[in-house]
Image: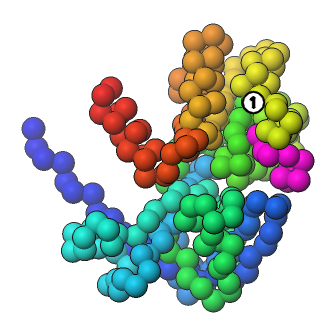
């Protein structure tokens, strides 16, 4: 068998932060553009995601900022930290894109960065990737997620044709974290509040499924994702090719730990 060609990592897109917006107590929107905007190539997915790169303080990196070169020439402790985020908004005419960040005080890497970033600062990213967009084959759509999936769910609702039946379940901390969601679809949107003890899985299981073929998007914390995977595939018989489902993060694990766990699970088959 011939060796697979080594995948080339393109130099990072370097954008300039233009402004920030506090959407909710724990959600911040970063809008970026500048000269590097032309290097960004959007795709057709509503879950279009980028890898945001956070350089290690005090380390000087080559230009252009090429992750492949950095990984080949720098020790691993000097590699930039990466976090995946959905592109919430892309405007070719205004030459800007927006990414929404969840922040909880000083926890993590991306949240504190988003809290402190200011206009003129640099946003480095690779991508976008993606795999999901609502299709015309489905008779109705099921959207399920927490704050980490909210940008993709919001974009999906915006992309839905008029009158298409949608059932959406979105878990957030409390009512202060709810956001206005625009859609032309026949959408029933239910906000699930963790602070009130509501259970996302129970809410989805209680849904009376409409007639017809369903396409589902289920993303967020790995615990509820695993439970809903079993329910939708095993009990509801949702077609695998019409189910986009993935754990974005795991409670109690860092992003690096969660990615290592997922890699081990894939290796184990």
Identify the residue at horizontal 38%, vertical 44% (top origin).
Answer: 260
Residue 135 at x, y percent in the picture:
65, 36
Q: In the figure, 219 relative to 5: above or below?
A: above
* 264 to the left or right of 114: left
Horizontal placement of 3 versus 262: left or right? left
Q: Position of residue 18 (x, y in %)?
A: 69, 83
Q: Is residue 44 magenta?
A: no
Q: Residues within 10 Å of mark 1 (few under 14, many from 20)?
A: many
Horizontal side, residue 34 vs residue 190: left or right: left
Q: Is residue 135 visible?
A: no
Secondary structure of the residue carrying tag 1 is helix
The residue beneath circle 1 is 200
- The quadrant in which residue 72 appears is bottom left
Quadrant of the frame with the C terminus = top left
Q: Percent x, y for residue 182? A: 86, 51
Q: Which residues are magenta?
A: 171-179
Q: Nearer the viewer, residue 232 or 220?
A: 220
The image shows residue 157, relative to residue 99, as above or below, that is above
């Amino acid at each position: 068998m011939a060796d697979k060609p080594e995948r080339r990592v393109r130099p990072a897109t370097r954008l300039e932060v233009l402004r920030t917006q506090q959407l909710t107590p724990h959600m911040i929107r970063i809008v970026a553009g500048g000269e590097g905007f032309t290097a960004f190539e959007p795709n057709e997915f509503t879950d279009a995601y980028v890898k945001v790169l956070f350089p290690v303080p005090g380390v000087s990196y080559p230009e252009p900022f090429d992750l492949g070169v950095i990984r080949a020439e720098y020790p691993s402790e000097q590699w930039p930290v990466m976090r995946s985020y959905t592109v919430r908004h892309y405007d070719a005419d205004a030459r800007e894109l927006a990414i929404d960040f969840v922040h909880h005080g000083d926890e993590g890497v991306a949240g504190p960065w988003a809290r402190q970033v200011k206009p003129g600062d640099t946003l480095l990213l690779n991508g976008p990737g993606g795999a999901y967009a609502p299709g015309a084959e489905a008779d109705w759509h099921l959207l399920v997620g927490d704050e980490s999936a909210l940008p993709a769910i919001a974009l999906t609702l915006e992309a839905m044709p008029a009158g298409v039946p949608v059932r959406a379940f979105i878990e957030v901390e409390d009512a202060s974290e709810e956001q206005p969601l625009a859609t032309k679809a026949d959408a029933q949107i239910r906000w699930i509040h963790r602070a009130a003890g509501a259970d996302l899985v129970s809410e989805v299981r209680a849904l009376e499924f409409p007639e017809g073929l369903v396409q589902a998007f289920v993303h967020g914390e790995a615990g509820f994702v695993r439970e809903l995977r079993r329910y939708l595939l095993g009990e509801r018989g949702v077609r695998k090719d019409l189910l986009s489902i993935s754990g974005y993060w795991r409670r109690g694990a860092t992003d690096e730990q969660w990615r290592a766990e997922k890699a081990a699970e894939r290796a184990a088959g």
